[in-house]
Amino acid sequence: DAMVIQNPRYQVTQFGKPVTLSCSQTLNHNVMYWYQQKSSQAPKLLFHYYDKDFNNEADTPDNFQSRRPNTSFCFLDIRSPGLGDAAMYLCATSGGQGLYGYTFGSGTRLTVV
Amino acid sequence: GQNIDQPTEMTATEGAIVQINCTYQTSGFNGLFWYQQHAGEAPTFLSYNVLDGLEEKGRFSSFLSRSKGYSYLLLKELQMKDSASYLCAVPFNAGNMLTFGGGTRLMVKP
């Protein structure tokens, strides 16, 4: 089945130790998004790629970076995770049908110790 | 900019009907989405409204009034598995991105 896959499902990292979260899709969607969702809060858009064009939200900390080496994969790099970065990170894609085809991955829950 | 308001929490009884409201302010309107999110899981699509009125889909219905900047999600014949957060979302940036409300946490009790 076509889908959006995030790995790992749960990630534990040490304070200050770089960590990378991955997202892959088999939908051939041209837009990929990374959202951060803290407990009991709304998902917050960090950045998105429209094809290879990278778009950063104005209030996304510099500590967060992203890479999209090809249509199928997108990575979220956190250079120096702090305790405040513990959250669920959601990858989503859209394309073709516009936002009607907005599909989320299962998320990666990041714990910083 | 966009602004979305939803109640934080609601409680209802199994078998009952519950209405979850959402008010929004957005520059340019490209429709409104409802998502369901169970604890620790990703949001899943429930409905999309772009025209005024009620859209029914099984036990779930969604209503939109563009002139009032208002939508609601109606859940009928509540089941325990309906306990989840319900997120209202509106597109922005020419419809390329979604902004989410804070979500309404619904607890269904026996």
Image (cartoon, rainbow, N blue to C red):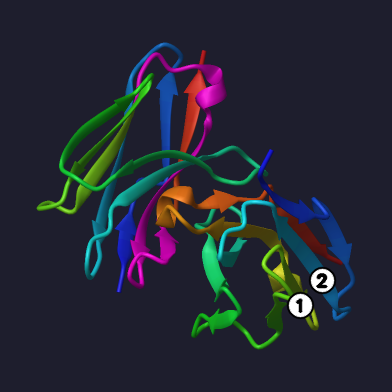
Q: Secondary structure at mark 1?
A: strand
Q: Chain of mark 2?
A: A
Q: Does B60 sit above or below residue A110?
A: above
Left or right of residue B82: residue A3: right
Q: Which mark is residue A34?
A: none
- Which residue is at 57% across, 74% downward? A51
Assign the N terminus of chain A to one quadrant of the image: top right
Which class describes the residues within 10 Å of circle 2: few (<14), some (14-19), or many (20+)?
some
Residue B11 picture quarter: top left
Left or right of residue A31: residue A69: right
Q: Label 2 is placed on what type of residue?
A: Thr
- List x then y, in percent, for residue A16: 85, 81
Q: Nearer the viewer, residue B55 or B79?
A: B55
Left or right of residue B54: residue A87: right
Residue lying at the far left of the rendered structure: B67
The alpha-carbon separation of the residues under discs 1 and 2 comes to 6 Å
Which class describes the residues within 10 Å of circle 1: few (<14), some (14-19), or many (20+)?
many
Q: Secondary structure at mark 2?
A: strand
Q: Label 1 is placed on what type of residue?
A: Ile
**Does the magenta segment cover residue B78?**
yes
Assign the C terminus of chain A to one quadrant of the image: bottom right
Q: Which residues are magenta?
A: B75-101
Which badge, 1 or 2, is on the more N-terminal residue?
2
Say which residue label 2 marks: A20
Total marks drawn? 2
- List x then y, in percent, for residue B84: 53, 35
- List x then y, in percent, for residue A82: 76, 77
Q: Chain of mark 1?
A: A
- Which residue is at 74% across, 76% downward? A69
Answer yes or no: are tags 1 and 2 on the same subunit: yes
Q: Are marks 1 and 2 in contact (CB under 8 Å)?
A: yes
Say which residue label 1 marks: A78
